[in-house]
Image (cartoon, helix red, strand yellow):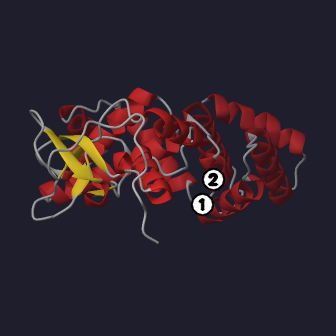
């Protein structure tokens, strides 16, 4: 169905020619020529989506999109945030056909390298303060992979990764990198619902401490093999995975598992485990 341009009560800056340079670094770009960033750190729906769409429908966009171009590619790509706003503009143009939703004044940034774009998106989301811990962790995982590809590097340690990210303007401590890697490698397959529901850094660290403590007790007291522990831990995590995650449920289930295997009371296991948790 062909759309007819709607009247513009609050239009964006009027384009002069397609992709024309308006001012230093500014270009007017057709939204069909702008792609979202495929490594967008935000993997979940923006909770403010409806509010942002209503605001843009009424008053346009307060800040221009920042775009770049990969070498050899025809279309522009978002350089630093803006994935939600781009999606909304595309929807509004599809719904209304209004010219003010078709051509946008954008800030253009010359291409440098892939990690710079990913980290620019991360910084933008950090400024907005609404990115979940697991989304940050997955983005840092992607950044590590891109750095390895760009440098042809082998294994990058957590300390090296923290140093490389800091040199690129995204400072993280080695301890935080370690927590993020644990979340991605250990917890994403076991607690996807809890993580997507906002399970944050403090609770992730408590799970990690419990994981270490129960593993140490399991092996020290010859409860069973390490492989058996990993299997039991995975089964119990998945059993209690929910938006209302409660680490107490997991701990009690692990205590019961050990008590059954070594044929002692759960109270004895609870007392011994407490010493391991404090280590």
Image marks 2 and 1: residues in contact by CB distance under 8 Å: yes
Residue identified by numbered label 1: 226
Q: Give me the residue at 20% from left, 52% from top.
A: 114
Q: Position of residue 242 (x, y in %)?
A: 74, 50
Residue 181 vs residue 124, the one in the foreground: 124
Residue 147 vs residue 49, the one in the foreground: 49
Seen in the picture, residue 35 relative to 269 is either above or below; the reply is below
Rate crowding at label 1 as few (under 14), some (14 to 19) or many (20 or more) other CA atoms within 10 Å.
some
Rate crowding at label 2 as few (under 14), some (14 to 19) or many (20 or more) other CA atoms within 10 Å.
few
Q: Quadrant of residue 170?
A: top left
Q: Is residue 36 visible?
A: yes
* 244 on left or right of 155: right
Seen in the picture, residue 172 relative to 42 is either above or below; the reply is above
Q: Position of residue 103 (x, y in %)?
A: 28, 49
* 273 on left or right of 278: right
The total of numbered circles placed on residues is 2
- The disc label shown at residue 219, or none: 2
Q: Give me the residue at 49% from left, 47% from top.
A: 182
- Element type where label 1 sits in the image: helix
Q: Is residue 161 visible?
A: no
Query: Which of labels 2 and 1 is toward the front?
Result: 1
Residue 66 vs residue 17, the one in the foreground: 17
* 55 on left or right of 149: right
Q: Quadrant of residue 209?
A: top right
Single out the residue that lies furthest toward the bottom: 1
Task: Estimate the spatial distance between the alpha carbons at disc 2 and disc 1, rounded to whole Å.
Answer: 7 Å
Q: Position of residue 10 (x, y in %)?
A: 40, 34
**Quadrant (top left/top right/bottom left/bottom right) for the C terminus:** top right
Marked residue nearer the N-terminal end (2 or 1): 2
Q: Position of residue 262 (x, y in %)?
A: 81, 56
Seen in the picture, residue 70 relative to 181 is either above or below; the reply is below
- Element type where label 2 sits in the image: helix
């Amino acid at each position: 169905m062909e759309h007819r341009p709607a009247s513009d009560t609050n239009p964006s800056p009027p384009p002069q020619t397609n992709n024309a340079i308006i001012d230093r670094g500014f270009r007017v770009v057709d939204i069909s020529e702008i792609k979202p960033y495929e490594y967008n750190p935000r993997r979940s729906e923006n909770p403010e989506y409806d509010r942002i769409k209503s605001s843009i429908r009424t008053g346009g966009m307060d800040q221009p999109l920042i775009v770049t171009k990969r070498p050899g590619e025809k279309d522009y790509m978002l350089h630093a945030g803006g994935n939600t706003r781009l999606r909304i503009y595309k929807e509004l143009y599809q719904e209304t056909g209004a010219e003010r939703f078709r051509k946008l004044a954008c800030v253009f940034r010359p291409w440098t390298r892939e990690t710079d774009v990913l980290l620019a998106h991360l910084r933008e989301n950090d400024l907005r303060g609404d990115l979940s811990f697991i989304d940050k962790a997955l983005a840092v995982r992607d950044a590590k992979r891109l750095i390895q590809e760009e440098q042809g590097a082998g294994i990058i340690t957590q300390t090296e990764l923290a140093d490389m990210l800091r040199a690129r303007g995204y400072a993280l401590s080695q301890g935080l990198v370690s927590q993020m890697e644990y979340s991605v490698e250990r917890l994403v397959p076991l607690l996807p619902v809890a993580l997507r529901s906002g399970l944050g850094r403090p609770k992730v660290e408590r799970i990690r401490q419990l994981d270490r403590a129960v593993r140490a007790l399991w092996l020290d007291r010859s409860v069973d093999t390490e492989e058996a522990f990993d299997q039991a831990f995975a089964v119990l995590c998945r059993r209690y995975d929910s938006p209302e995650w409660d680490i107490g449920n997991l701990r009690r289930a692990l205590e019961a598992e050990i008590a059954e295997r070594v044929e002692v009371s759960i109270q004895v296991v609870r007392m011994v485990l407490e010493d391991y948790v404090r280590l």
